[in-house]
Amino acid sequence: MSLVVRLLCLAMLLALLPISVWVFGWHWQISQSLGERQPWFWLTLTGSFPFALLTTAAALLFLHWRLKWSRQQLLRHGACLLLALLAGAGVKSYLKWHFKEARPYVQYLDKTHNADFYQDSATRQRQLIDKSPIPQWLKRHWRAERGYSLPSGHSQFAASLALYAGVLLWLAGAWGSLLLVLAWALVVMGSRLLLGMHWPSDLLLSIVLSCLLIWPALRLGNGKAVS
């Protein structure tokens, strides 16, 4: 089975989350249950800067141990993965500026306060957030992430890391580790929905972009070992 087929299979598994949300018609909304979602915030932090750097380092060290990489292999794979992640960050920033899609919580604020969030000053944006009936930890998170929605940077990071590691673990037959990596990526993506930060379409585009970026990174990281 080729690298591309493995990559697409794993991407399709990740895509089941946003597709399922669409099919079942789930929509984020303000509710009392938001106060119970703080564990999801902690999970989302694994894809937030600067914690994402620690997550990446931990993933590479785990792969180094699990796949018995040499030091040279670790450096090569680390460089290829980091290049893919940096390229993804650049593409993500451009697309956010291009699409200018409002986040779910921003649409809620605009509708509730008859506002135009992205046209308001930073001070006014923070004031609107502070008026929301949500926990303080979520207010801090919203205040820290007031940019556009499409695509999801956290989801793209999680998908990229999971796809890169997942293909390598699949090749090694490390099925337990593969499931663990996929589960982590899914909960990070799910946290973005539950915290009012992204739409299912944001997650889906992020997965597509991750595939496009991770494929050449894997080819370079593995050399001629994988076709």
Image: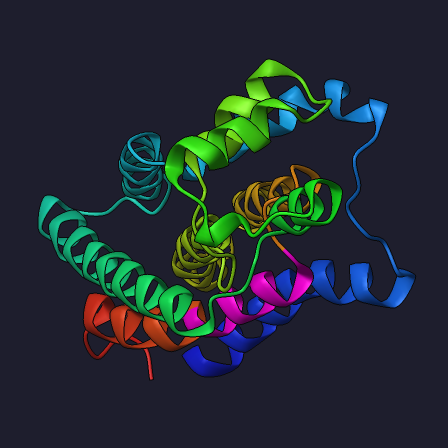
Q: Tell me what residue is drawn at x 45 percent, y 58 percent.
A: 156
User: Residue 9 appears in which quarter of the rendering?
Assistant: bottom right
- Residue 36 sits above or below residue 143 on the image: above
User: Residue 57 appears in which quarter of the rendering?
Assistant: top left
Q: Is residue 225 visible?
A: yes
Q: Which residues are magenta?
A: 199-209
Q: Picture coordinates of residue 162 (x, y %)?
A: 47, 53
Q: Quadrant of the C terminus?
A: bottom left
Task: State left or right for residue 91 relative to residue 172.
Answer: left
Q: Is residue 37 magenta?
A: no
Main SS of the magenta part reads helix
Q: Tell me what residue is drawn at x 52 percent, y 33 percent.
A: 142
What is the tally of numbered marks visible in this picture? Answer: 0
Q: Picture coordinates of residue 56 (x, y %)?
A: 31, 40
Q: Is residue 45 visible?
A: no
123 vs 95, nearest the viewer? 123
In this view, which residue lies farthest toward the top?
Answer: 136
Q: Tell me what residue is drawn at x 40 percent, y 31 percent.
A: 123
- Residue 156 sits above or below residue 204 on the image: above
Q: Picture coordinates of residue 93 (x, y %)?
A: 32, 61
Q: Tell me what residue is drawn at x 32 percent, y 33 percent.
A: 58
User: Residue 213 appears in which quarter of the rendering?
Assistant: bottom left
In this view, which residue lies farthest toward the left?
Answer: 72
78 vs 159, nearest the viewer? 159
93 vs 61, nearest the viewer? 93
- Residue 180 sits above or below residue 139 on the image: below
Task: State left or right for residue 92 relative to residue 185.
Answer: left
Q: Picture coordinates of residue 4 (x, y %)?
A: 45, 82
156 vs 10, nearest the viewer? 156
